[in-house]
Amino acid sequence: MGLLQPDLILEDVFAIDLPRLQANGIKGLLIDLDNTIVPWEESLMEERFITWVQQVKEQGFAICLVTNALENRTANFAGLLEIPAVGRAWKPLNRAFSRGLKLLKLPAAQVAVVGDQLFTDVLGGNRMGLFTILVNPLSTKELKTTKFMRRLEGRVLDKMVQKGQLSAQAVSIRKGGD
Ligand SMILES: [Mg+2]
Protein backbone atom coordinates (compact mmCIF):
# COMPACT_ATOMS: atom_id res chain seq x y z
CA MET A 1 0.00 0.00 0.00
CA GLY A 2 2.89 2.35 0.76
CA LEU A 3 4.02 2.46 -2.86
CA LEU A 4 0.56 3.61 -3.95
CA GLN A 5 0.44 6.44 -1.43
CA PRO A 6 0.89 9.87 -3.00
CA ASP A 7 2.84 12.46 -0.99
CA LEU A 8 0.26 15.07 -2.02
CA ILE A 9 -3.21 14.99 -3.55
CA LEU A 10 -4.16 18.23 -5.27
CA GLU A 11 -6.97 19.54 -7.43
CA ASP A 12 -4.69 20.42 -10.34
CA VAL A 13 -1.16 21.57 -11.20
CA PHE A 14 -2.04 25.18 -10.29
CA ALA A 15 -2.44 24.07 -6.67
CA ILE A 16 1.22 23.00 -6.49
CA ASP A 17 3.08 25.26 -4.05
CA LEU A 18 6.29 25.68 -6.06
CA PRO A 19 8.24 27.74 -3.47
CA ARG A 20 7.42 25.11 -0.85
CA LEU A 21 8.67 22.30 -3.08
CA GLN A 22 11.84 24.29 -3.62
CA ALA A 23 12.24 24.81 0.12
CA ASN A 24 12.03 21.04 0.48
CA GLY A 25 14.91 20.50 -1.93
CA ILE A 26 12.89 19.69 -5.06
CA LYS A 27 14.62 21.05 -8.16
CA GLY A 28 12.87 19.22 -10.96
CA LEU A 29 9.46 17.98 -12.09
CA LEU A 30 8.59 14.96 -14.18
CA ILE A 31 5.17 15.86 -15.50
CA ASP A 32 2.54 13.59 -17.01
CA LEU A 33 0.79 14.79 -20.17
CA ASP A 34 -2.65 13.26 -20.72
CA ASN A 35 -5.34 14.32 -18.28
CA THR A 36 -2.73 16.17 -16.21
CA ILE A 37 -2.00 19.19 -18.44
CA VAL A 38 -4.09 18.38 -21.51
CA PRO A 39 -7.36 16.39 -21.73
CA TRP A 40 -6.93 12.89 -23.14
CA GLU A 41 -7.03 12.82 -26.96
CA GLU A 42 -7.19 16.64 -27.20
CA SER A 43 -4.67 18.17 -29.55
CA LEU A 44 -4.87 21.70 -28.12
CA MET A 45 -3.47 22.71 -24.76
CA GLU A 46 -5.16 25.48 -22.82
CA GLU A 47 -3.09 28.64 -22.49
CA ARG A 48 -3.12 28.46 -18.68
CA PHE A 49 -1.18 25.20 -18.73
CA ILE A 50 1.39 26.62 -21.15
CA THR A 51 1.78 29.64 -18.86
CA TRP A 52 2.11 27.37 -15.82
CA VAL A 53 4.97 25.43 -17.42
CA GLN A 54 6.71 28.74 -18.26
CA GLN A 55 6.35 29.81 -14.62
CA VAL A 56 7.80 26.51 -13.41
CA LYS A 57 10.84 27.11 -15.61
CA GLU A 58 11.14 30.76 -14.58
CA GLN A 59 11.15 29.74 -10.94
CA GLY A 60 14.25 27.70 -11.62
CA PHE A 61 12.85 24.19 -11.89
CA ALA A 62 13.99 21.69 -14.48
CA ILE A 63 10.91 20.09 -16.06
CA CYS A 64 10.44 17.11 -18.35
CA LEU A 65 7.37 15.37 -19.78
CA VAL A 66 7.10 11.67 -18.99
CA THR A 67 4.11 10.20 -20.76
CA ASN A 68 2.81 6.93 -22.10
CA ALA A 69 1.46 8.85 -25.11
CA LEU A 70 2.81 8.04 -28.56
CA GLU A 71 5.99 9.74 -29.82
CA ASN A 72 4.24 12.17 -32.20
CA ARG A 73 1.83 13.48 -29.61
CA THR A 74 4.64 13.74 -27.07
CA ALA A 75 6.92 15.60 -29.47
CA ASN A 76 4.18 18.10 -30.38
CA PHE A 77 3.58 19.12 -26.78
CA ALA A 78 7.27 19.02 -25.82
CA GLY A 79 7.90 21.41 -28.74
CA LEU A 80 5.04 23.70 -27.73
CA LEU A 81 6.24 23.84 -24.12
CA GLU A 82 9.94 23.86 -25.06
CA ILE A 83 10.82 21.13 -22.58
CA PRO A 84 12.45 17.70 -22.94
CA ALA A 85 10.24 14.63 -23.03
CA VAL A 86 10.11 10.88 -22.65
CA GLY A 87 7.30 9.54 -24.84
CA ARG A 88 5.94 5.98 -24.90
CA ALA A 89 7.45 5.80 -21.46
CA TRP A 90 5.64 2.65 -20.28
CA LYS A 91 4.95 4.03 -16.82
CA PRO A 92 5.00 2.58 -14.19
CA LEU A 93 8.21 0.88 -15.38
CA ASN A 94 11.31 2.30 -13.70
CA ARG A 95 12.98 3.06 -17.00
CA ALA A 96 10.29 5.66 -17.78
CA PHE A 97 11.35 7.70 -14.77
CA SER A 98 15.07 6.96 -14.98
CA ARG A 99 15.09 8.32 -18.53
CA GLY A 100 13.34 11.44 -17.26
CA LEU A 101 15.83 11.87 -14.42
CA LYS A 102 18.69 11.59 -16.89
CA LEU A 103 17.18 14.40 -18.99
CA LEU A 104 16.72 16.56 -15.87
CA LYS A 105 20.26 15.70 -14.71
CA LEU A 106 18.97 15.42 -11.16
CA PRO A 107 18.93 12.64 -8.54
CA ALA A 108 15.55 11.11 -7.60
CA ALA A 109 15.60 12.80 -4.17
CA GLN A 110 15.40 16.24 -5.85
CA VAL A 111 12.54 15.44 -8.22
CA ALA A 112 8.74 15.33 -7.95
CA VAL A 113 6.46 13.43 -10.30
CA VAL A 114 3.11 15.01 -11.11
CA GLY A 115 0.33 12.94 -12.65
CA ASP A 116 -3.33 11.91 -12.55
CA GLN A 117 -2.95 8.14 -12.14
CA LEU A 118 -2.19 6.11 -9.04
CA PHE A 119 -1.03 2.97 -10.86
CA THR A 120 1.33 4.68 -13.30
CA ASP A 121 2.50 8.07 -11.98
CA VAL A 122 2.34 7.47 -8.23
CA LEU A 123 3.34 3.81 -8.15
CA GLY A 124 6.26 4.32 -10.53
CA GLY A 125 7.38 7.54 -8.87
CA ASN A 126 7.31 6.09 -5.36
CA ARG A 127 9.27 3.05 -6.47
CA MET A 128 11.97 5.35 -7.82
CA GLY A 129 12.07 7.40 -4.60
CA LEU A 130 10.50 10.51 -6.13
CA PHE A 131 8.14 12.91 -4.37
CA THR A 132 4.70 12.06 -5.78
CA ILE A 133 1.88 14.50 -6.49
CA LEU A 134 -1.50 13.15 -7.62
CA VAL A 135 -3.84 15.58 -9.39
CA ASN A 136 -7.41 15.15 -10.60
CA PRO A 137 -7.83 13.95 -14.18
CA LEU A 138 -8.80 16.86 -16.46
CA SER A 139 -11.35 14.80 -18.31
CA THR A 140 -13.39 11.67 -17.64
CA LYS A 141 -12.74 10.66 -21.22
CA GLU A 142 -10.01 8.03 -21.24
CA LEU A 143 -9.08 4.51 -22.27
CA LYS A 144 -11.39 1.70 -21.10
CA THR A 145 -8.50 0.15 -19.20
CA THR A 146 -7.89 3.48 -17.47
CA LYS A 147 -11.56 3.70 -16.47
CA PHE A 148 -11.24 0.27 -14.90
CA MET A 149 -8.11 1.38 -13.02
CA ARG A 150 -10.00 4.45 -11.76
CA ARG A 151 -12.39 2.22 -9.84
CA LEU A 152 -9.44 0.40 -8.27
CA GLU A 153 -7.83 3.79 -7.51
CA GLY A 154 -10.95 4.86 -5.64
CA ARG A 155 -10.92 1.71 -3.54
CA VAL A 156 -7.22 2.02 -2.73
CA LEU A 157 -7.60 5.67 -1.69
CA ASP A 158 -10.63 4.84 0.50
CA LYS A 159 -8.63 2.09 2.19
CA MET A 160 -5.77 4.53 2.89
CA VAL A 161 -8.24 6.85 4.58
CA GLN A 162 -9.60 3.96 6.70
CA LYS A 163 -6.05 3.11 7.76
CA GLY A 164 -5.32 6.74 8.58
CA GLN A 165 -2.59 6.98 5.91
CA LEU A 166 -4.43 9.76 4.11
CA SER A 167 -6.93 12.30 5.37
CA ALA A 168 -10.51 12.06 4.13
CA GLN A 169 -10.18 15.70 3.18
CA ALA A 170 -7.17 15.02 0.96
CA VAL A 171 -9.06 12.30 -0.88
CA SER A 172 -12.25 14.35 -1.19
CA ILE A 173 -10.33 16.69 -3.51
CA ARG A 174 -10.33 13.89 -5.97
CA LYS A 175 -13.54 13.69 -7.93
CA GLY A 176 -12.54 10.49 -9.70
CA GLY A 177 -13.50 9.25 -13.16
CA ASP A 178 -16.94 8.26 -14.42
MG1 LIG B 1 -2.30 10.86 -17.27
Image (cartoon, grey):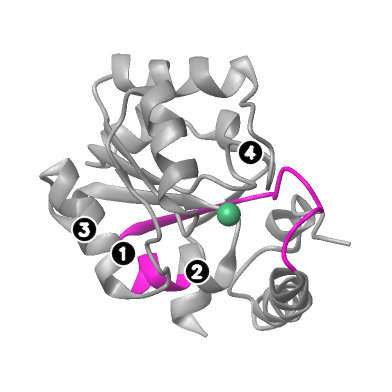
Residue 41 belongs to magenta span: no
Amino acid type, residue under disc 2 in the picture: Thr
Indicate if the residue with disc 2 has its beta carbon within 8 Å of ligand 1: yes
Tags 3 and 4 touching, CB below 8 Å: no
Distance of label 2 from label 4 (alpha carbons): 17 Å
Residue at 31 percent across and 60 percent down: it is 130
Amino acid type, residue under disc 4 in the picture: Asp
Q: Determine whether the residue tagged by mark 3 lies in a helix, strand or loop.
A: helix
Distance of label 1 from label 4 (alpha carbons): 22 Å
N-terminal label among 2 and 4: 4
Number of the front mark, 2 or 4? 2
Q: Which residue is the site of mark 3?
A: 99
Q: Residue furthest right?
A: 178
Q: Nearer the viewer, residue 131 or 79?
A: 79
Relative horizontal placement of residue 64, taking residue 81 as reference (left or right): left
Residue at 51 percent across and 20 percent down: it is 50
Relative horizontal placement of residue 24, taking residue 103 as reference (left or right): right
Q: Which residue is the site of mark 2?
A: 120
N-terminal label among 3 and 4: 4
Please say if 77 is above or below 144.
above
Q: Determine whether the residue tagged by mark 4 lies in a helix, strand or loop.
A: loop
Q: Which residue is the site of mark 1?
A: 96
Amino acid type, residue under disc 3 in the picture: Arg
Mark carried by residue 12: 4
Q: Which residues are magenta?
A: 123-143
Distance of label 3 from label 4 (alpha carbons): 25 Å
Residue at 31 percent across and 30 percent down: it is 83
